[in-house]
Amino acid sequence: MEILPGIHRIESDLGERFMCQYLLLGEERTVLIDTGLAGTPEEVIVPYLQGIGLGVEDVDEIIISHADVDHCGGNRALKQMKPGLRFSCGEPDRAWVESNERIMAEIYLWSEPYGFGPDDESKDWIRTELGGDSPVDVGLCGGETLRLGPDWRVEILHLPGHTPGHLGIWDQKNDAAIIIDAALETGIYDREGDRLLPPRYFDATGYQSTIRTLHSIRPAHLLTAHYQPMQGEEALDFLDRSLDFTVQVHRVVGEGLKNGTTDLWELTQYADEKLGPYPEFMTELGAGVRAHMGLLGPA
């Protein structure tokens, strides 16, 4: 639905949880943020566009927030629908967004040398839903502005941590920050409110800095990919909980190291015991554990 003037939130199922893309519909330019999974364009995005009297041919640009299967998996499908469609993403994430093999190896299978990672079924699902290689036209670094209409310009935010090149959108006109996965509270929940997945961040200090930056903006509206829209103090509380989670991970990792545990998988299991449990993709907790190990002691 159109949740703010010119901002449409497109929600669809992602297993037991949901995911969202955002359509910025200006007088001069139409921009889609993220493409979902491999089938999302045909199953969700195109029908939504048709429902508001538009088609893929009316979309001018795709901005990919970051390199994750549920955010860039539909790239190839949309590129095939409109070959001239321009794609952009954060430059540090570009190689992963463009190449399925690189995103598999460096985002999803990075932990295998440490003795853990997604199971075979999960690997097959990720490979399928990545949808195939697709080029990115423009690498963004944050600070760029995009004119959508005569009185509407938005700013690209660099929000690292979850991934190095994670992007968001600051819309001053609507006093809204579209942050996608830049902050993830204490985890992602299903539609019934049960916590499923841990927050994943590869860079602890970058993730913390991102959360503090967003808090300093004090947006009236906070829009994400996996949580309901938040406003005012609710949004600030969400950011506070996201930052506090990193403090808890740091504490737990410190306890484990103090007790003589230096194995990453053992520390990840210890963190899940203390901060979870996370019934799905618990292994992703290992990214944050490794980041804090780097701050506290030997990796």
Image (cartoon, rainbow, N blue to C red):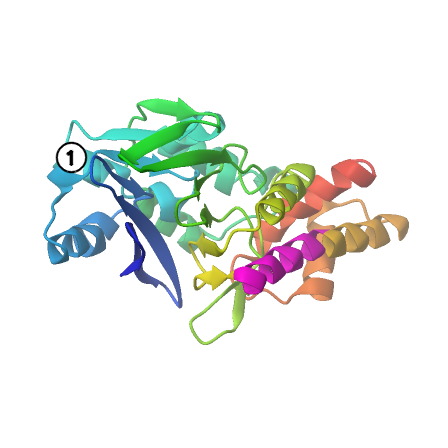
Q: Is residue 247 highlighted in magenta?
A: no
Q: Position of residue 73 (x, y in %)?
A: 32, 43
Disc 1 residue type (three-letter): Gln
Q: Position of residue 237 (x, y in %)?
A: 62, 62
Residue drawn 54% across and 61% down? 232
Q: Position of residue 87 (x, y in %)?
A: 29, 30
Residue drawn 55% across and 66% down? 279
Q: Position of residue 299 (x, y in %)?
A: 75, 36
Outermost residue, front direction? Answer: 151
Secondary-structure class at tag 1:
helix
Q: Is residue 67 above or below residue 10?
A: above
Q: How many numbered discs?
A: 1
Nearest to the observer: residue 65 or residue 70: 65
Q: Is residue 52 visible?
A: yes
Residues in magenta, as a range:
232-246
Q: Is residue 103 above or below residue 71?
A: above
Nearest to the observer: residue 151 or residue 249: 151
Position of residue 210 in the picture relative to residue 231 (left or right):
right
Nearest to the observer: residue 202 or residue 222: 222
Residue drawn 43% across and 34% down? 155
Q: Quadrant of the N terminus?
A: bottom left
Nearest to the observer: residue 76 or residue 153: 153
Determine the image quadrant of residue 229: bottom left
Residue drawn 85% across and 54% down? 255
Position of residue 8 in the picture relative to residue 238 (left or right):
left
Q: Is residue 6 above or below residue 229?
A: above
- Count residues near mark 1 (Cα–Cα under 10 Å), then give few for <14, some for 14-19, many for 20+: few
Residue under circle 1? 80
Determine the image quadrant of residue 111: top right
Q: Main secondary structure of the magenta part?
A: helix
